[in-house]
Image: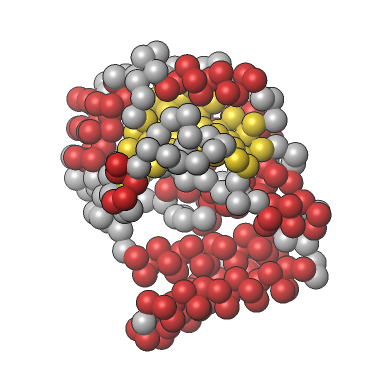
Amino acid sequence: MRVSVMITSRNRSADLARTCAQIKRLNPGPFEVLITADGCTDDTIKVVKKALPGARLIVNKVGRGSVASRDFMMREARGDLVLALDDDSYLEQGDALRAIATDFEKNPKLAVLHFPQRTDEYPETLSQMDFGSARLTRTFANSGAVLRRDVYLSLPGFEPRFFHMYEEPDYALQCVAAGFEVLYNPILTIRHYFSGATRNEMRNHHRHSRNELWSVWLRCPFPQCLAVGAYRLLSQLGYARKRGLGWVLREPVWWWQALQGAGFCFKNRRPVAWKMYRKWLRLG
């Protein structure tokens, strides 16, 4: 099976250069590499042309967000499988693509395969050896996951309106509801440097919370969506309380953002059966 690689990047050219160097050491190498420079104002384009001159470079002069960028690359890719990486993450094993293809060939129901990450966000993982056993999950991280492209094209896919955050659990829900599997498998590992550049914790919390609620409105059947939506709102408020009063006072920011997208969500609702939604909720 042919494996494409996709990366979206915004003003983190040094991290991207390191990831490109690691992609070049893969043996066998990927069928193709797609990289989106999403509203970059640094030397990202120059870095890509130098580090991976054969890559398919997509330039968004105005940032469209990581979710829309990944959705576009999934539809443009020509591989059977697409390995999603961040600009600051890469596979640690040089022969990883062979193992990835084998897993998908053995399991036609496998829609997403993802791996444990050694990340600076959680320093204890940098030396961790035991990452547990393989198991089905309800989400994954696009900083180290492989997606079966024909399954992606048969489903709504990543919602571009999300801009950034939460596209993974929303897509995992789509996969589970359609009878496919999202599998965590520690046969490989991802090195994720988790760059702090262009990251803002509160902004990401607001986007995650807003998109989580939008996902409920898009996918959860009625009347269960009322209770699930209320639970999501309260659980995010609980998280904000743990972070401090300043976070609590800023919660209405994402509430208003969510309401602004309510019309879009209810117009484009494609609810799944409650039985499948509940199955997805119960996954680890």
**Image-quadrant location for residue 8:** top left
- Can residue 20 be seen here? The reply is yes
> 40 above or below 20?
below
Residue 168 point in image, percent of width and height: 54, 48
> 33 above or below 133?
above
Instruction: Please tell me which residue is depicted at 65% across the width and 68% down the height of the picture.
Output: 263
Instruction: Please tell me which residue is depicted at 35% across the width and 20% down the height of the picture.
Output: 94
Instruction: Please tell me which residue is depicted at 37% across the width and 30% down the height of the picture.
Output: 91
> 49 above or below 197?
above
Extreme-front residue of the structure: 130
Residue 19 point in image, percent of width and height: 28, 33
- Can residue 39 be seen here? The reply is no
Colouring mode (rainbow / by chain / secondary structure / one colour): secondary structure
Towards the viewer: 29 or 134: 134
In which quadrant of the rendered image does the N terminus lie?
Answer: top right
Q: Is residue 237 left or right of residue 111?
A: left
Towards the viewer: 60 or 55: 55
> 125 above or below 91?
below
Q: Is residue 191 left or right of residue 147?
A: left
Residue 201 point in image, percent of width and height: 34, 65
Residue 161 point in image, percent of width and height: 53, 56
Instruction: Please tell me which residue is depicted at 34% across the width and 29% down the height of the picture.
Output: 92
Towards the viewer: 17 or 232: 232
**Image-quadrant location for residue 215:** bottom right
Q: How many marks?
A: 0
